[in-house]
Amino acid sequence: PSRQEVSYFGAGPAPLPTSVVEEGAKAFVNFNDTGLGLGEISHRSAAATKILNDAKANLTALLDIPDNYEILFMQAGGSGEFSAVVQNLVPVWIERRRRRAEAEITKANPNAEKAEVDELVFSRLQKEVDEELKLDYLVTGSWSLKASQEAARLVGSKYVNVALDARKANNGKFGVIPAEETWSLTPTKKEGGKGSAFVYFCDNETVDGVEFQSFPKSLEAQGQDEEDERLVVADMSSNFISRKVDVSKYAVIFGGAQKNIGVTGITLAIVRKDLLPPHTATPPPALLHRLNIGGLPGPVVLDYATIAKNNSLYNTLPIFNLWIAGQVMADLVNAFGAQKVSGQEEVASQKAQLIYGALDKFPQVYQVVPDKSIRSRMNICFRVHNGDDAKEKEFIAGAEKRLLQGLKGHRSVGGMRASNYNAVPLENVQKLVKYLEDYATGN
Ligand code: PLP
């Protein structure tokens, strides 16, 4: 079949706008009549730099990214960022504590030698790490679960505070986000504690079809003090540039490109600049080793400061993949102009409503998996005849006949999943809706 005939609802890698892949195919062979393809040019060439800077400018325009944030293009995928956030933000916590300890100890011991102060600082830090280092995770689906497991692997599970395990409120299954009052976030200073190194959540859980509907109230900063601030980290891999985001509320936003932005191989991170050295000096690696909290400092290619300092060109960046991402962003900027990403948000909601509307019309045939209050606009997870194996196979076979592809749910949960990313055309959603109706009514 031709591209136009296939409607693809895969969860990632996911469909790209046809105009972008067609242009991309040309650029892969001969970019701008230079006689070289985009997979062949140097990542340090003028052409590559322009592609990089244009992509940054377009992303900044789309999401209104404030000046005090860096946009980083990295590799290693969303999973690489599970490690990167730990590797980069735990040292910020340690350095803040180290500075405070040093100031207080120096004040209390004005005549002490530097080595003596360092030893006292070390002892205090050791105690503070042991008793107070906490990484808060909101576990609302498979990906935040994986991220929390990676944090535990890197620094040790005793430092990971699972502030919410949504399965506990839903018979062991993901599919709900319980009320914020039930979360057990590490208390900030205002709340009688000392705060955590960061609070992590996954904005849209791709496997489970669960999406935060808005920024959680309890993650707002509690005051000006460092211990009152919650450094919020969000995985937006599967809902990046699909709705308006107040970037200023986050320490780090990250996502792999292969859903809403482009092809696999590029990972985006938006990082608040004051969390990067030299603004926040990192604690000396030797100190981290002595503190014995596992995989810190980690690989330099995951070090935000290094990537920022090198304008994302510390090592070889895949420029073809970057070009694709840049093109997708440029097209959104052109399509929605001053509306920015809100324009895309409207389209995404409209398409999601069409699909959920069709599913809800036939409750005996289709059962949406997650609770209505937190349904994802991007990954629509449902069962056919309550998960009857034969019926689900029949549903998929019927869909394939109409060239509606990629509807099978993630292997870990089964069922169906229609991914409704930015590049899925309304027309394809309409074809799916027609099939949902026809299947349910026996046509
Ligand atoms: N986070 C989310 C929300 C995802 O959907 C995925 C992949 O599907 C990942 C992280 C992992 O991304 P990657 O495969 O790029 O490591």
Image: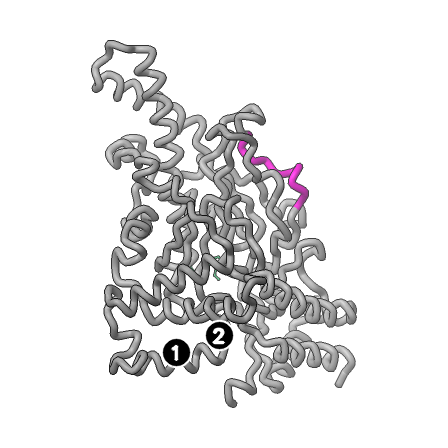
Above or below, 30 against 180 in this view is below
Q: In this view, does 170 lie to the left or right of 281?
A: right
Local secondary structure at mark 1: helix
Of tags 2 and 1, the one toward the viewer is 1
Instruction: Provide residue 300's location: percent of width, then percent of height.
Output: 27, 49
Instruction: Provide residue 351's location: percent of width, then percent of height.
Output: 65, 70
Could you tell me which residue is drawn at 53 percent across and 68 percent down? 11
What amino acid is at disc 1?
Answer: Gly
Q: How is the image coloured?
A: one colour
**Residue 442 seen in render:** yes
> Which quadrant of the figure contains the C terminus?
bottom right
What is the span of residues highlighted in magenta in the rendered image?
178-187
Q: Residues within 10 Å of mark 1 (few under 14, many from 20)?
A: many
Above or below, 88 against 412 in this view is above
Instruction: Provide residue 222's location: percent of width, then percent of height.
Output: 56, 32
What amino acid is at disc 2?
Answer: Leu
In the depicted view, which residue is nearer to us: 352 or 30?
A: 30
Q: Which of marks 2 and 1 is nearer the N terminus?
A: 2
Q: Are marks 2 and 1 in contact (CB under 8 Å)?
A: yes
Could you tell me which residue is drawn at 68 percent across and 76 percent down? 391
Could you tell me which residue is drawn at 30 percent across and 18 percent down? 120
Report the magenta stretch's main SS.
loop
In the depicted view, which residue is nearer to us: 81 or 391?
A: 81
Q: Residues within 10 Å of mark 2 (few under 14, many from 20)?
A: many
Could you tell me which residue is drawn at 70 percent across and 55 percent down? 371
Please tell me the numbered disc located at residue 412: none
- Magenta run includes residue 182: yes
Please tell me the numbered disc located at residue 16: 2
